[in-house]
Image: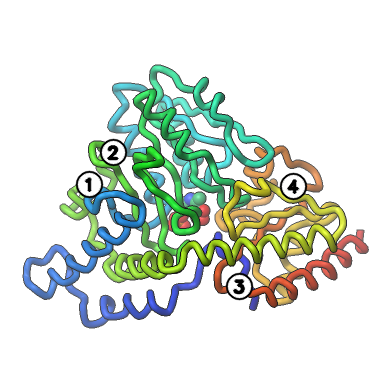
């Protein structure tokens, strides 16, 4: 199998699995317990808080464990909307967010909040002047993703944060695709809240975190016990959190090297596709994109049909984000980039990771050439 759907999820790293196993087996204490056995679990998750905090230049008490990206996004948006409802009810986001943000905004809209969805250019990047112009007296939150899950476009996060802070507005970023795939420093980049998810960087599914800068106070999201400083109740996912910490350590060991390796491999794949297959359009930016992301449209064919043929060749790809696969109607992200007709229909997303090889890329190009030609011949 050639796995090119790493933006959907990644396999748990063997080192991560090894770190997790004792916490499912012998070391099963509840971190809230006050005897030594339970305190070992508490110590283990507090160590992960430190590891994650160091990785983004935050403080350990600013890291809150959650069940993943979706919960972190929901908490950031709904929590801040609730806290600041008397100050204002206007939120700014973009038209290319993940549905974890878009559908949360729609939920808030039904409850009386006003949402501005910023447009993006054909590279999938927002216009900072438009952001500035969209700010109103009652704007309480700006939520703009760090990097897009479909086309990998990376936003000018530092400048967005600068604009937010100049206007005394809280800035949340969904960094689910970006964290550990590109460098992030929450202090230098003016980020107040940041969502991340372990299964996107070789941790386990159902585990993530929300960074909340000291002083920012989203309303309690999960009501119950006193876990996570009393603002996110529920017995901690100890094995998931320990695994996430190990995944962070492993990713940091060779992050730069992996980024270069993955980017070169992606560029090689793109070069061969563009030179050996006619009528191909690259979706998104050539430069301002995540190293592992490639999204191309093969004009004149259905991306879905190509995906099925590649699947028969043992190649896993996607025609959009995993969460919208199968919904039909075309990707809201590609539409926002200006794609329509053939370009919208023929899109294929391939997301690479450091485990992929050049030999795999050669095989993928070979299968793409044949399958695209076969589908075009059928028309
Ligand atoms: N945000 C982005 C940008 C994503 O890509 C995803 C998952 O694909 C999510 C949020 C949701 O994360 P999770 O699967 O951890 O709920």
Neighbourhood count class around disc 4 (C-alpha, 10 Å): few under 14, some 14–19, many 20 upward: many
CA gap, disc 4 and disc 1: 42 Å
Pick the front one: 279 or 160: 160
SS class, disc 3: loop
Q: Using residue 15 as the reference point, say whether residue 312 is left or right of it.
A: right
The residue sitting at 45% across, 38% down in the picture is: 158
Q: Check whether the beta carbons of the residues at disc 1 and disc 2 lie within 8 A of each other.
A: yes
Query: Which label number is shown at residue 218?
Result: 2
Snapshot quadrant of residue 138: top left
The residue under label 3 is 356
The residue sitting at 60% across, 32% down in the picture is: 119
The residue under label 1 is 231
Q: Check whether the beta carbons of the residues at disc 3 and disc 2 lie within 8 A of each other.
A: no
Name the mark nearer the viewer: 1 or 3. 3
Which badge, 3 or 2, comes first in the chain's sequence? 2
The answer to whether residue 331 shows anywhere in this view is yes
Q: Using residue 62 as the reference point, say whether residue 207 is left or right of it.
A: right
Pick the front one: 96 or 106: 96
Pick the front one: 231 or 111: 231
- Residue furthest to the top in view is 137
The residue under label 4 is 344
Which badge, 4 or 2, comes first in the chain's sequence? 2
Callout 1: CB less than 8 Å from ligand 1? no
The residue sitting at 27% across, 63% down in the picture is: 48
The residue sitting at 38% across, 64% down in the picture is: 248
Neighbourhood count class around disc 1 (C-alpha, 10 Å): few under 14, some 14–19, many 20 upward: some
Which badge, 1 or 3, comes first in the chain's sequence? 1
Which badge, 1 or 2, comes first in the chain's sequence? 2
CA gap, disc 1 and disc 2: 8 Å
Percent across and percent down for residue 272 are 78, 64
Callout 2: CB less than 8 Å from ligand 1? no
């Amino acid at each position: 199998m050639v796995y090119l759907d790493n933006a959907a999820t990644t396999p748990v790293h063997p080192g991560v699995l090894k770190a997790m196993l004792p916490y499912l087996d012998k070391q099963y204490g509840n971190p809230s317990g006050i005897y030594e056995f339970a305190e070992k679990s508490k110590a283990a998750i507090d160590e992960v808080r430190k590891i994650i905090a160091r990785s983004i230049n935050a403080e350990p008490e600013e890291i809150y464990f959650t069940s993943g990206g979706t919960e972190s996004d929901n908490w950031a948006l709904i929590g801040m909307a609730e806290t600041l409802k008397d100050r204002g009810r206007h939120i700014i986001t973009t038209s290319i967010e993940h549905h974890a943000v878009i559908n949360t905004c729609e939920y808030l809209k039904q409850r009386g909040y006003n949402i501005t969805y910023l447009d993006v250019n054909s590279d999938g990047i927002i216009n900072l002047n438009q952001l500035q112009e969209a700010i109103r007296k009652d704007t309480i939150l700006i939520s703009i993703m760090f990097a897009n899950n479909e086309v990998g476009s990376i936003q000018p996060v530092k400048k967005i944060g600068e604009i937010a802070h100049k206007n005394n507005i809280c800035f949340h970023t969904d960094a689910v695709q970006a964290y550990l795939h590109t460098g992030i420093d929450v202090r230098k980049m003016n980020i107040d809240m940041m969502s991340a998810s372990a299964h996107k960087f070789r941790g386990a599914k159902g585990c993530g975190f929300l960074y909340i800068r000291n002083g920012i106070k989203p309303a309690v999201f999960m009501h119950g016990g006193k876990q996570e400083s009393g603002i996110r109740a529920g017995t901690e996912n100890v094995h998931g959190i320990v695994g996430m910490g190990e995944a962070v350590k492993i990713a940091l060991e060779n992050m730069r090297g992996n980024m270069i390796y993955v980017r070169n491999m992606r560029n090689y794949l793109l070069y061969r596709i563009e030179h050996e297959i006619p009528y191909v359009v690259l979706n998104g930016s050539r430069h301002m994109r995540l190293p592992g992301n490639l999204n191309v449209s093969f004009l004149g064919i259905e991306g879905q049909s190509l995906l099925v043929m590649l699947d028969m060749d043992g190649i896993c790809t996607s025609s959009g984000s995993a969460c919208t696969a199968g919904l039909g109607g075309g990707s809201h992200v590609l539409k926002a980039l200006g794609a329509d007709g053939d370009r919208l229909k023929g899109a294929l997303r391939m997301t690479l990771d450091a485990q992929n090889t050049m030999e795999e890329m050669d095989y993928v190009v070979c299968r793409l050439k044949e399958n695209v030609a076969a589908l075009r011949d059928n028309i």
